[in-house]
Amino acid sequence: MVEAIFIMTAMLVFFSLACSLWALIKRGLYHRWWGLIAALLSTGIVCFIIRALSQSYVDADGLLHEYFALIPVGYLFSFTGIVGSLILFNIEYLSSRK
């Protein structure tokens, strides 16, 4: 179940990142906001990559060393970017219909 949630989140992040990069290249009215959203999503992806590549270990005193804080930070950046891209997409869609 956890893997399915992670895969769905990763798909949403990559889709939102692709949409924000496409809008950034298009240079629309809100291209600076799309750049901010792309930066948020990229930071979330980098947090997950660093966490996946880091090694956790237990030292001689029995203390666990791992970058556990990168998981909630990565989700925070990812969900903020996803929500921001949905909001900005709706703003652009509604303003283009007028």
Image (cartoon, rainbow, N blue to C red):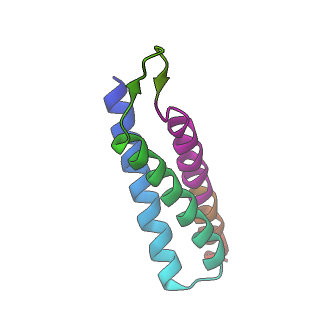
Residue 15, quarter of picture: bottom left
The residue lying toward the viewer, choosing from 93 and 54, is: 54
> Which quarter of the figure is the C terminus placed in?
bottom right
Residue at the image position 65 percent from the left and 82 percent from the top? 29
31 over 49 or under it: above or below: below
11 over 58 or under it: above or below: below
Q: Please provide percent x and percent y for residue 70.
A: 52, 40
- Magenta residues span 66-85
Q: Is residue 48 magenta?
A: no
Residue at the image position 36 percent from the left and 36 percent from the top? 55
The residue lying toward the viewer, choosing from 54 and 13, is: 54
Q: Please provide percent x and percent y for residue 93.
A: 59, 69
Residue at the front extreme of this rendering:
60
- In terms of secondary structure, what is the magenta stretch mainly? helix
Residue at the image position 49 percent from the left and 18 percent from the top? 63
Q: Please provide percent x and percent y for residue 83.
A: 60, 51
Q: Is residue 53 left or right of residue 93?
A: left
Residue at the top extreme of this rendering:
62
Q: Please provide percent x and percent y for residue 17.
A: 45, 62
- Number of numbered tags placed on the structure image: 0
65 over 22 or under it: above or below: above
The residue lying toward the viewer, choosing from 67 and 17, is: 67
Residue at the image position 46 percent from the left and 31 percent from the top? 66
Q: Is residue 42 left or right of residue 87?
A: left
> Which quarter of the figure is the N terminus placed in?
top left
The residue lying toward the viewer, choosing from 9 and 49, is: 49
